Image: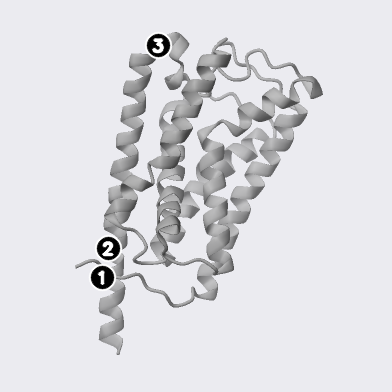
Amino acid sequence: MPIEPSTPALSRNARVAFGITALLSALGLTLNVIITALGVYPSTTTNPNLFGYSDPSGLTGVISRVLDFASYFTILSNVVVVVVLAALWRGRIGPTPVWRTLRMDSLVMITVTGLVFAVVLAPTADLQGLQYVTNTLEHYVTPLLTVLTFLVWGPRGWLRLGTVFTALVIPIIWLAYTLLRGAVIDSYPYSFLNVAEFGLGRVLLNVAGVVLLGVVLGLVFWGLDRLLSRRSAHSDVSTS
């Protein structure tokens, strides 16, 4: 039988942990948008079909740089983490269908961000100065803490099998936006989405692989949530 969500207020330690994670993610985003808008580190991209290739330096290209910045999956996943974990820190949300889905999104999207960066993008990343700080916060610290706080504090019983699939809505919307915008401006955020270089068929295969990874991760988090919920319920019974 499905495990009902636990609804008692989160402990002080849980709220502090969620708040710190949200704060660190927000710090990475804020620093990143500032150095991006100001053009502090001119892009070294040499591929004409990837973001940053032809952006003017300084304030001249601020709009295009900020639009590109906001179009990265990394940024979207960190924003979702900030929204969800800040709400948990405030303690004013419950296991409604929307928050169940967003909770799953915060876990799956940020985990995909960390894994794809570490495996696919990190070997060719060219970082400078404060980019080391923002990159570490967005791709390593936030994913690790988001998963860790889930494992330790939950909240338990929020995830459902259905949320594995409803959580795909936001990433699929992002993918559609990315491919449509890329077709217009002939530029893409990541090499594995570069339709101009690899063709639509190859890119869709790459996308299918990432979506499959997201589904697998969603199933893993759902399974972990059920397991940890059962252990928590058993512990409560044993101590009563």
Disc marking residue 226: 2
Mark number, residue 65: none
Residue 173 placed where, x, y %? 45, 35
| Badge number at residue 230 | 1
Image vertical order of residue 63 relative to residue 224, above or below: above
- Drawn side of residue 54 relative to residue 78, left or right: right
Q: Determine the secondary structure under disc 1.
A: helix
Q: CA distance from mark 2 to mark 3?
A: 41 Å
Q: Position of residue 28 (x, y in %)?
A: 63, 44
Image-based side of 158 in relation to 58, left or right: left
Residue pictured at 37% horizontal, 73% vertical: 6
Image height check: is 28 above or below 146? above
Return the residue found at the far left: 1
- Residue 55: tell me if it is visible: yes
For the residues marked 1 and 3, what is the alpha-carbon distance in whole angstroms? 47 Å
- Image coordinates of residue 41 in percent, x first then y, are 71, 25
Q: Identify the image quadrant of the N terminus.
A: bottom left
- Asked whether residue 122 appears in the rendered view, the answer is no
Amino acid identity at mark 2: Arg
Label 3 sits on a secondary structure element that is helix
| Quarter of the figure with the C terminus | bottom left
- Between the C-alphas of marks 1 and 2, the distance is 6 Å
Q: Label 2 neighbourhood size at 10 Å, few (<14), some (14-19), many (20+)?
A: many
Q: Which residue is mark 3?
A: 198
Residue type (three-letter) at the residue carrying disc 3: Phe
Q: Quadrant of residue 23?
A: bottom right
Task: Assign a secondary structure to mark 2.
Answer: helix
Q: Amino acid type of disc 1?
A: Arg
Q: Residue at x 64, y 40 (%)?
A: 133
Q: N-terminal of the two: label 2 or label 3?
A: 3
Residue at the spot x=55%, y=31% of the render? 72
Q: Write the residue at 42% across / 33% down.
A: 116
